[in-house]
Image (cartoon, grey):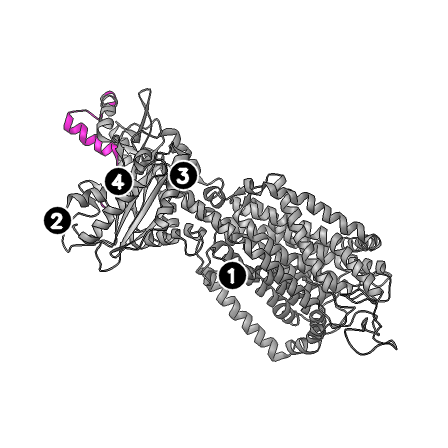
Amino acid sequence: MAKCNTNCIERPISVGFGHFGRVVARYPSVFLILPLLVAAALGSGFMYLKEMKANDIEDQFTPVNGPAKQERMTVDEYFSPSEEFSRLRLSSEGTYASLIITVLEGENILTEAALTDIIEMDRQVKNISTGNTYENLCAKTNGKCMSNFVLDILNELNLNSTARYPLHNRTFLGTSVGGVELKSEGSEIRSAKAVRLFYFLNEENTALNTQWLNGFLEFFSNYPELKTVRVSYFTSLSRQKEIEASSDSIIPFFSITYALAINVSIFSCLRLDCVRTKVWVAVAGVLSTGLAVLASFGLLLFCGMPFAMTVASSPFLILGIGVDDMFIMIACWQKTKVKEEVEDRLAETYKEAAVSITITTLTDVMSFYIGLFTPFRSVQSFCMYTSTAILFCYIFNLTFFGACLALNGRREKGNKHWLTCMKVPEVDSVDATGNVCCVGGAYDKETGTDEAMSMDLFFKNHYSPFLTKTWVKISVCLIYSAYLAVSIYGCLQLQEGLDLKHLAPDGSYVGSYYDDEDQFFSSYGPNVMLVVTDEHFEYWNSDARQNLDLCLENFQNLSMASKDSEISPISWLTAYIKFGQSSGINVDNETQFKQSLPTFLRLSGFSEDVNITNNKILASRMFIQSVNIRTAVDEKNMLNAFRETAERCGKLETAVNVMVYHPAFIYYDQYAVIVGNTIQNIVVATCVMLVISLFLIPNPLCSLWVTFAIASIIVGVTGFMALWDVSLDSVSMINLVICIGFSVDFSAHISYAFVTSEKLSVNEKAKDALYKLGYPIIQGAASTIAGVVVLAAAKSYIFRTFFKIMLLVILFGAVHGIVFIPVFFTFLGTCKKMFCATKKTYNQPIYQY
């Protein structure tokens, strides 16, 4: 068989790093102090942390170039805010406070006792003073504060009369009265379970509004419990304040995580031999990771990179990745000859570990850099900080940690105690007493290397022989089939979109408000704005109006649009036609149509719905009331249906250029991009991973199994996260990108170890690969889980989601690495080596996770 040179990239990298390791061992003080100085200097960038925090929900958690943002710009361009406030016509959510008052006992809130409490609550809100009262700051209509019509109606009624629903005397109550039960005949309200009140403020007084809204929150946070009703409250500032509180709540977990990581690392590297134990090396590995986070984050803060809330979870992940690299270097160090000089040992360590660490770093970094192309700033921020931190981890492991390893090697060379650094007798010397605390320096006399750890021997003598039994391999195949079936089922159940209430911590008043809103006020959804943007549209032309009516009819025929003609559509044109017919105006004549229109708009309250400039109608708008928007799926379907219908209107015989908009569409836009963008990132990242694998692990068979592992793990994580009540959103997208990098970490090395094994039979190759990699995979998985496990106790959905998906990624990755892939390889037949055979025997690297 012809011999082929396929390690032309891998080999020079190993040799080059061998030389670098020799330099580090020769001057450990330089490589110890220099990283500390760099970390200290760059870490000063944290003084900019406060001003670089970017927790604006719309900016961070909605698509950067979402269509709704452009639609909002169009609305603002054509329809300037009026002095007369109209909630229906806001292009944003507005500045407001809101109360949802629900009944405690019985099934009707429209009782005298409950109404008395509601009216008293309304009075107290209006008396809240932070230097200014509500009356001074409120949004006004006809010179008076915008009223809560439901209170006006209830004040007018007595207990013997009832209100009509959803329209009472031309006042829409669908968003003000909830949990409504109507009388058997007609539209009169028999009972209701909730009342919602709004208090909108004039948006010109930003600072004063903030003070008043904060006073509102403080007032209701201490509001006493009532006997008849329960209240939940919310303001336009609430989501922002709560997401900032959620971000701050994670800070105490950092110290717990680092303490846990140090303990896990020490335990993993602990030996009874007082010389060979790697206690200080393990501590140095965790410290190296901390320095990398400090330096990388500080650098990016210096550069003005926004620090989103999602970045707060990055150090937990970085810790796991950094410690994994430490385990690789320690494993390679333990394969070197203990009697050789420290320079030679470290050179050999770097030579053996170089490709392995480079592979994991490149795959992880590239995964995150690809995430920079997502349209969510929160994802971009996370990926930039995390990828940069991984690069610094790589650098600090090769410098700072390498120097610590060299210093520890000098201690071992002198046979000194790990704690006292006092020289102790060697195990086989005449002075040895047999006490493990007083003697040390044991090593394998046959190989000249450190003695194999008990877990390595477990994989060699017990686990791998068990796994390669025929009936076990058949069982593993059945288990994998079940895993794949459940995963695919879960993928079909996957929900899309980020529920805004999840941005607040558990137990927050925001969650209570959203729960009440979903329970009692989901019968009526957004009142969607239909904007005719064609300045050449001839409203006075009966044929053009007929096409516009057909367009409106198409909207009204949608399943999520109200069929009640009294509340939808709200059309100035329909009202004007009726006005013209009753006033003798020829609405089919352009001159008469335009002459009478301004008077009608001023008298009817539609003045904000038509833009007339220089006697030309530049744009106009109508409104369609949506109904039964209860879930994220309903929101997605509504957005798609309204936009598709608007597109069809432009294809009518007389084209009607219609644009649909509502402030909520800014958040609904995530549904339009989240799936496609996630798939795009996964495909691109997978291709990049394959290219890296082909260059650094030049074996086609290995690359195919890398592809298989990536696909299998991503399907598993996606399916099980859906079954674990995690939706596909900007937060989980981050984790799926992470999934790709970790899939490569777990699969590439076990595959390469198998196909390059010198053993003859496939079973022996599998055993050999597991002996070399079984324990390092367990170490890597344990350290990464230790890095994120404390997030399970976080009170924030974002951080808990991060933990859930990372746990799935690590568990499934580890299971693929030490169970599925070794078994599947045994069905392939004996594999031929495909790496370079040169004149000298090629020393196979110890690829460890």
Q: Which residue is the site of mark 2?
A: 161
Q: CA distance from mark 3 to mark 1?
A: 34 Å
User: Mark 2, residues whose alpha carbon is within 10 Å: few (<14), some, or many (≥20)?
Assistant: few
Q: Is residue 586 magenta?
A: yes
Q: Which residue is mark 3?
A: 210
Judged from the image, the secondary structure of the residue bearing numbered disc 3 is helix
Eye-nearest disc, 3 or 4: 3
Few, some or many residues within 10 Å of mark 4 (<14, 14–19, 20+):
many
| Separation of residues labelled 1 and 4 (CA atoms) | 48 Å
Identify which residue, 506 or 772, lies in the foreground: 506
What distance separates the C-alpha of mark 3 from that of mark 4?
35 Å
Secondary element type, mark 2: loop
Q: Which residue is mark 1?
A: 792
Residue 531 sits above or below residue 328 on the image: above
Q: Which residue is mark 4?
A: 569
Q: Residue 817: x, y in percent?
A: 63, 66
SS of the residue at dot 4? loop
Residues drawn in magenta: 563-591
Q: Are marks 2 and 4 in contact (CB under 8 Å)?
A: no
Q: Calculate the distance from the C-alpha at mark 2 to the C-alpha at mark 3.
A: 40 Å
- Name the residue at 67% across, 50% down: 292
Give the x, y percent position of residue 62. 46, 44
Q: Position of residue 266 (x, y in %)?
A: 68, 65
